[in-house]
Image: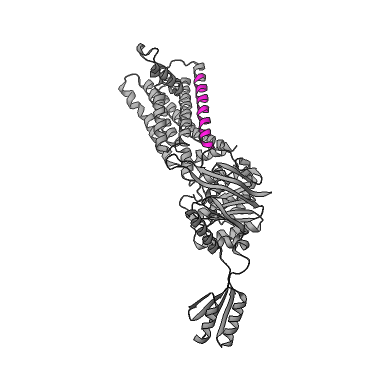
Amino acid sequence: MHAIATRGLTKVYKNLTKGNKRSLDELSIHIREGEVFGFLGHNGAGKTTTIKILCGLVRQSAGEASLFGIDVRDPASRAKLGYLPEQPYFYEYLTPRETIEFYGRLRGRTPQQRAEDWERLSLLLDLRDIAEQRIKGFSKGMRQRIGFAVALVGDPPLLILDEPMSGLDPVGRRSIRQLILRCRDEGKTLFFSSHVLGDVEQICDRVSILSRGKLVREGRIGQLLGEEPHGVEVVATGLNEVSRAPIAAAAREHRTHEGQDVFVFDEAAAAQEAARAILDSGAALESVTPLKQSLEEFFMKEHGATAAGAGA
Amino acid sequence: MRIWIVALNTFRESVRDKVLYVLLLFALTAVLGSKAIGWISIGQDIKIVKDFTLASMSVFGALIAIFVGTSLLYKEIDKRTLYTILSQPMRRWEFVLGKYLGLGLLLGLVVLVMALVSGLYLLVLGGKPDAAYFLAALLIYWKLLLVTSFAVLLSSMASPILGAIVVFALYVFGHATGVFLDLPAQFDGTFSKTLLEGLYYAFPNLGNFDIRAEAANGVPINPSYVLFALAYGTLYSAAVLIAAVWAFENKDV
C-alpha cells in the first residue's frame, strides 16, 4: 500500500476580482511506505497546496488523494499522519508541555501514553528546560522544535514536513536534519518540501519537481542526476607553457586557480591521458576526480527549461 | 470528546487573557455603582439595583460574546494555529462546536459571577434576590449563547471588525423586532408589510429573553414562558451553528 497517493489532483483557487488561479494541475504521485520523498519546486509551484490538501486544510477541486488508502477528505486518514507546517504556530499562552498534552488529547492518547509522549519528545527535542515557559516569545528554532515534537505525538508512521529547515540557522538546520535522518532510520515515511537542495540530496530516496502546479520530473536522485559522472576533473601544479597547451586543447574546460591548473574532460580516457602527460612533463598531479551533477544544477536546469517552455 | 478538549482550551485561553478581567472589573463596577442610581429614585433603590445589574450582565456579556466570538475562528486562521489542529484526525464541526462551547463556558462563568455578586449586594442592601431574579439571569445567558452563535458564524466568514459590526447590529435589531409588526393601518396589504413581517420572523427576537422588568418589580414569572424562551434560544442557536459549520466545512485555510 502507498503511504501517499494522488491521482489527477487539481486545485483551482476561485477569486471573483483577480480571476481563478490553477495552483495544482493533475498531480499524480505515489510514495511507498518507508520512503523518504523530496518535493521540490520554486515558490508558488504548488508544493504547499499539495501538502495542505494531504493534511485536510484545503479541499481539492478535482482528482483524488489518499493516505494509506484512506481518502484525505476523511479525518481518519490523518490518524497516521504527523504534520509540520512551514512556520508552525501554536497557542502562545500554552507551555511546550501543555502543547504536547493538548495535541495528545486531540489524537485520543490515554494519560499514560501522553506522559510517555512527553518523556520521549522532550528528551528528543530538548524541551525540558523550557517545559514550563509560555511559547510567546520563543525563537523560530524553538518553535520549530516544538512543531517537530507535535508532529511526532503518537509516533505516526507518516511525516509531512513543509520546508522544515526554512529560516533556521546552521545549528538549527543540522538538528532538524538529524531528526529527519533518525525518523528515516526508524522506518517512517517522510514527505518533505525544501529549498535546501543539498539537504534533499543527502536525505531523500526519490524526488519530484513541481513547476507551475505541474509535475515535471520524478524519480530516484541517482537516476535523475545520472549514475555516470558527467566529466572528470584533473588538477596539476608546476605545468610549463609547452606542456599545458596540448592538455588544455584536449580538455572541455581549463582554468587556473591559486597557481593550479584545473582541466575538465568529458571522457575518463582523455583524463587518464592528460594525467600521464602531466607526470611525464615533471609537473605534480594533484587530483583526478569524477564530476557528478548536483541536485541544484539539475533543478535549475529543469526550472529553466519549464520557464522557457511556458514563455514560448 | 474532542469538542470538549477544544472547548476547555478555548476557555483556558480566555481565562489567561487579561482583557477578560478588565471587562469583568467594569461589569462589577457597574453592578456596585447601581446604588448611585438607586439614590436618585427615592424608595425604588432595590428595584433599580435589580434592573441595573441585570442590564449590566446583558450588555457586558454581549460585549464579550461579540468581541471574543467574532475573532474565535478568524484568529485561528489568521495566526495559522489551525494548521496543526485540523491536520489531526478530527472533524471540522468538532472544532467549531468546541470553540463555541468554550466561549459559552466563559460567558456562563461571567454571568454566574455577576449574578452572585449582584445577589450578595442585594442582600447587603436589604433586598431579596428571588428566583425570578436568577431566572432573568439565566435567560440573559441563553440570549448571550444565541449572540455567540452568530459571532461564530461571522468569524468563519468575515474579519473580526466586520463581524462585530454585523453582530452588534443584530443585537440592537434583535431587541427591537417588535417594530416590524407594530405598523400603522395604511401598511395593511402592502409588500412592505409582508417584507417587514418576514424580517420579524427571520431576525432573532432577543426580546423573548427579557424578563428584567418582571424580575425587578417582583411580578411572578410563568415557568412555561421561561421554557419557551430556552427552547427558542436553543433551536435558533442550533440553526445558526449548523450554518457556521457548513460555512467552515469547505473553507480552505
State the predominant SS element of the stretch in magenta: helix
The image quadrant that residue B48 belongs to is top left
Determine whether, in the image, residue B236 is placed left or right of residue A78: left
The answer to whether A107 is drawn above or below residue A177 in the figure is: above
Residue A150, can we see it? no
Picture mark count: 0
Residue B195 placement (x, y as % from top left): 41, 19
**Residue at the farthest right position:** A1
How is this picture coloured?
A: one colour
Q: Which residue is pictured at 59% across the width and 60% down the height?
A: A178
Q: Is residue B60 above or below residue A208?
A: above
For this orientation, the residue located farthest to the front is A312
Residue B61: percent from the left, percent from the top? 43, 31
Query: Which is more toward the observer, A55 or A244?
Result: A244
Q: Give residue A74's position: percent from left, percent from top.
A: 61, 40
Is residue B239 found inside the magenta-colored segment of the image?
A: yes
Q: Is residue B43 magenta?
A: no
Residue at the spot 63% in from the left edge and 62% down from the top edge: A223
Q: Is residue B251 visible?
A: yes
Nearer to the camera, B123 or B6: B6
Looking at the rendering, the stretch of residues picked out in magenta corresponds to B228-252
- Above or below — where is A292 with respect to B40? below
